[in-house]
Image (tube, rainbow, N blue to C red):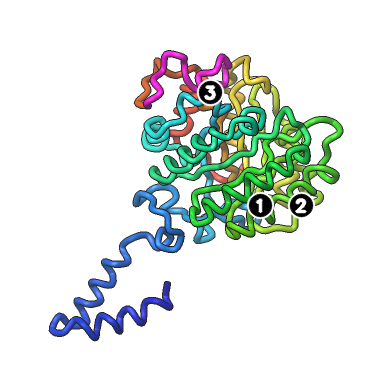
């Protein structure tokens, strides 16, 4: 931006006549009132919103940071399957999450079992990205590898998908990319499967969106962050996914995180208040221990899930309106806990 300032001042000085240089400078200052990151990116975010404040995210010393290099912790929600549980995927719902719940990131879970045979879901993905932009919150486009187990089985489709989305959103700093949700199965390893897959997909995104933040899933349902940390990827602005469910996972997984965080940046792109099945519970005490742990270590998180699914992990009761403005009675026990946590201060870094 500085290179453009000098000729602009010269232009004003040659045209202001009696107004004088002081007025010209005032005009220049007014013209710069728009957030400069918006001008550079071509995107428009509400003044004071999370994206307006933090801009394009990057990794500095194994910590997620904002455009100025200051640590940032995002807190938000993940959608469920966009086809079967898309009732809350609309602008009104996302506005309520951003403005009433203090959500700063929304994860768009693109289930391959429903997306690949039904490309009309692309419109829902784009709606989520657009609604997040309108509210100035970050959006994760998540290639939701789950039943596929090995991300390499859909590598060709992932290449096509991320090439299209990265090109489409190349000027949007609020868009983040998660390239494989939960690689799983004893035969799926970091060295042989997940890392080579990531090394194939990341350049596809970076060719089109070179400064983008990319989240990489890890084996064993995104729990083996310690194994990934032993052989990290040779790319910048990479965070590694860690998932937990408070009723199932405990100190053993936290030990893996402690070990891994000495070498890599971690992002909790999915967690639940329940058992790993998405049911049972919720477990508010254990959830609180987990959130204190991750927040105090500067780890961002997305809760599962933005739905009224018949699961204890769902945020909403079936009677809840899809248009936002929810009351306590619209929320499940899990939803009540998550909303209260989102509205509370972030745990102090230090653990």
Give the crowd class for mark 2: few <14, some 14-19, many >=20 residues within 10 Å.
some
Numbered tag placed on residue 85 in the rendering: 3
Quote the CA–CA distance across marks 1 and 3: 29 Å
Q: Residue at x 54, y 30 (%)?
A: 79
Q: Quadrant of residue 14?
A: bottom left
Q: Which residue is mark 2?
A: 232
| SS under mark 1 | strand
Task: Give coordinates of residue 260: x percent, y percent.
Answer: 74, 45
Q: Which residue is mark 1?
A: 238
Region rendered in magenta: 307-323
Task: Give coordinates of residue 89: x percent, y percent.
Answer: 46, 30
Which comes before the other along the chain, label 2 or label 3? 3
Quote the CA–CA distance across marks 2 and 1: 9 Å
Number of the front mark, 2 or 3: 3
Q: Can residue 125 be spotted in the picture?
A: yes
Which comes before the other along the chain, label 2 or label 1? 2
Which comes before the other along the chain, label 1 or label 3? 3
Q: Residue furthest left?
A: 18
Q: Can residue 256 be spotted in the picture?
A: no
Q: Is residue 264 left or right of residue 301?
A: right
Find out whether residue 167 is within the magenta segment.
Answer: no
Quote the CA–CA distance across marks 2 and 3: 35 Å
Give the crowd class for mark 1: few <14, some 14-19, many >=20 residues within 10 Å.
many
Q: Residue at x 42, y 31 (%)?
A: 90
């Amino acid at each position: 931006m500085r290179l453009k300032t000098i000729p602009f001042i010269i232009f004003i000085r040659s045209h202001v006549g009696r107004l004088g240089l002081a007025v010209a400078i005032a005009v220049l200052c007014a013209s710069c009132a728009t957030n400069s990151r918006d001008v550079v990116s071509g995107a428009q975010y509400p003044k004071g919103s999370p994206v307006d404040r933090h801009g394009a995210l990057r990794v500095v010393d194994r910590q997620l940071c904002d455009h100025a290099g200051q640590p940032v912790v995002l807190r938000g929600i993940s959608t469920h399957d966009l086809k079967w549980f898309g009732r809350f995927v609309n602008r009104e719902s996302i506005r309520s999450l951003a403005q009433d719940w203090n959500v700063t990131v929304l994860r768009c879970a693109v289930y391959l079992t429903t997306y690949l045979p039904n490309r009309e879901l692309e419109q829902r993905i784009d709606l989520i990205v657009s609604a997040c932009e309108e509210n100035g919150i970050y959006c994760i486009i998540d290639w939701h590898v789950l039943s596929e187990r090995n991300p390499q089985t859909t590598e060709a489709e992932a290449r096509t998908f991320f090439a299209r989305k990265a090109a489409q959103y190349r000027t949007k700093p609020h868009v983040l990319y998660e390239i494989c949700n939960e690689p799983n199965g004893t035969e799926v390893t970091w060295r042989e499967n997940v890392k080579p897959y990531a090394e194939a997909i990341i350049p596809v995104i970076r060719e089109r969106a070179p400064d983008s933040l990319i989240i990489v899933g890890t084996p064993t349902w995104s729990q083996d962050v310690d194994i990934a940390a032993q052989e990290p990827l040779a790319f910048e602005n990479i965070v590694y996914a860690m998932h937990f469910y408070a009723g199932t996972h405990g100190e053993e997984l936290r030990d893996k995180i402690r070990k891994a965080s000495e070498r890599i940046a971690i992002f909790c792109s999915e967690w639940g208040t329940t058992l790993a099945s998405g049911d049972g519970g919720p477990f508010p005490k254990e959830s609180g221990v987990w959130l204190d742990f991750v927040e105090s270590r500067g780890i961002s998180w997305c809760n599962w899930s933005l739905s009224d699914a018949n699961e204890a992990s769902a945020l909403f009761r079936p009677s809840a309106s899809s248009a936002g403005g929810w009351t306590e009675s619209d929320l499940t026990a899990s939803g009540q806990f998550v909303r209260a946590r989102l509205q509370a201060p972030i745990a102090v870094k230090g653990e």
